[in-house]
Each structure stands twice: as structure tokens, then as C-alpha cells.
Amino acid sequence: YGHTRLACQPSGNELALCWPTNARTFTLESATALTSTSWSAWPTAPTVINGTNTVQIPATEPPRYFRLRMPY
């Protein structure tokens, strides 16, 4: 799990963030600055699409940084 990668790709008017389903203990977090000390859990839970956890981010969202974090 230490090398789980978050992938992103455009999907219409959204950005699809994806990671393997075997890494389901990870939480998707976001912040407005990469060096932020205040990362927040993304409010939408992932859905499984084509064998990956997927979260769709609307293109209308302000610029953000994303990361995966293990909750423990």
C-alpha cells in the first residue's frame, strides 16, 4: 500500500481521480496549497468503476491539490 498512486484523467466536464480497489482504506484529501497543513477529506465517497476507486471532481471546483492518506 505504501506505493499506491492516485491517477487523474479528464472525463468530460470533470476530472476523474482513480486508485486501486485493494487500497480502499485510503482517504482522498484535498487542499488549496501543496504545502498546506490543513488537508480535508473529500466529501464524496469513491465509486468502483472498471476495478478502480473513482471520484469525479467537477471542473467548476477551484484549483486544488489531492492526495491519498491512510487513516492510521
Image (cartoon, grey):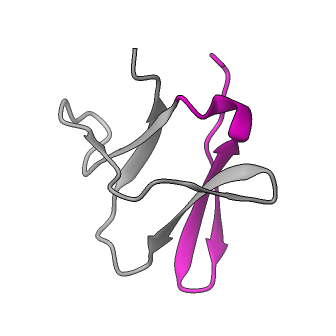
**In this view of the protein, which residue sits in the foreground, 67 or 47?**
47
Q: Is residue 71 left or right of residue 37?
A: right
Q: Residue 19: x, y in percent?
A: 66, 43
| Residue at the (66%, 19%) spot, across then down | 1
| Residue at the (38%, 49%) spot, across then down | 65
Up/down of 11 relative to 35, above or below? below
The C terminus lies in quadrant: top left
Q: Residue 39: x, y in percent?
A: 26, 38
| Residue at the (55%, 69%) spot, across then down | 15
Q: Residue 63: x, y in percent?
A: 33, 64
Res 20 quadrant in image: top right
Q: Does the magenta stretch include residue 27?
A: no
Q: Give the range drawn in magenta.
A: 1-25
Q: Residue 10: x, y in percent?
A: 63, 72
Q: Which residue lies furthest to the bottom in this view?
A: 13
**In this view of the protein, which residue sits in the foreground, 1 or 65?**
1
| Residue at the (40%, 22%) spot, across then down | 71
Report the number of discs: 0
Up/down of 52 relative to 37, above or below? below
Q: Does the magenta stretch include residue 24?
A: yes
Q: Residue furthest right?
A: 50
Q: In this view, does 51 lie to the left or right of 30?
A: right
Q: Residue furthest left?
A: 38
**In this view of the protein, which residue sits in the foreground, 34 or 28?**
28
Q: In this view, does 59 lie to the left or right of 55?
A: left
